Image (tube, rainbow, N blue to C red):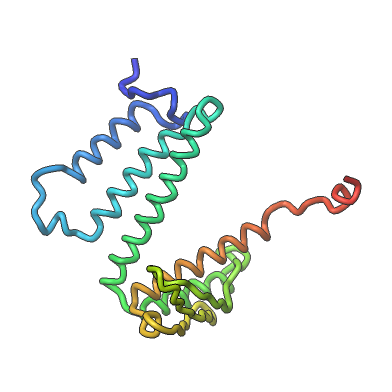
Amino acid sequence: MPIDRAPDIRPDWWDDQTYLHLCALEDAALPERGMSPQERAHPTLPILGRLLKAVWWLGKTGGIEHRHWQADDALRMVEGLAEDAAAHARRSLSRITDQDDDDLRAESDYTAMRDDPQSGPPQACLVSAQFTVRLPGYAGDTVGGSITVDAGVMAFTGNGPLADTDLLGRMDLRAVVRAIEAAVGRQVERPCPDSRADLAG
């Protein structure tokens, strides 16, 4: 008899060993008691916690043909937890790096992608973008910004609270740039519809 109490909602890769390993990792890395204040305040702890929870929820995506709504909810939880973990990782990274290092790494990645055959064909690269966002609250005030990216190096100008963007804000904006590039790349790479079939229909 499996030790997992819900094996019928797990995907094929989830077995008793997966269950035991995750339990042991969570028990060792996220104990309820025994942590010093410094350990509880460690910046990577929220990252680990959310990634572990994401794996737990990923384990609830099995049996889709019988529980489609459960798989849907589980995958949305995985997406949200992974995004939250990434945000915490950027926050931690902003404490140990600076803008020059961030731009240098981005420029190096861009150069490798463009010139190194081992990196594969060049990916989609955002060149410029503008946005307007309504601020929190009921006043309806808005702020705007403009992003330009040249050979991986990002420049940003904005108004209001965005006029003086700190490093974490820049890293959040760079994550937005990557998301836009990924969305465009996916659209370009998807199979094109057969125009003749469309006309025939």
Q: Nearer the viewer, residue 123 or 179?
A: 179
Q: Nearer the viewer, residue 43 or 70?
A: 70
Q: Quadrant of residue 47?
A: bottom left
- Residue 18 in percent (x, y) is at 35, 32
Give the vertical position of 23 relative to 199 (above or below): above
Instruction: Give the residue at x 17% y 59%.
Output: 41
Instruction: Give the residue at x 57% y 79%.
Output: 128
Q: Residue furthest front?
A: 139
In the rendered view, does 154 fall on the left or right side of 33? right
- Residue 136 in percent (x, y) is at 39, 68
Give the vertical position of 10 relative to 39 (above or below): above
Instruction: Give the residue at x 36% y 84%.
Output: 164
Instruction: Give the residue at x 14% y 55%.
Output: 39
- Residue 63 in percent (x, y) is at 50, 27
In the rendered view, does 64 fall on the left or right side of 186? left
Q: Quadrant of residue 169?
A: bottom left
Q: Quadrant of residue 117?
A: bottom right
- Residue 156 in percent (x, y) is at 46, 82
Q: How many marks?
A: 0
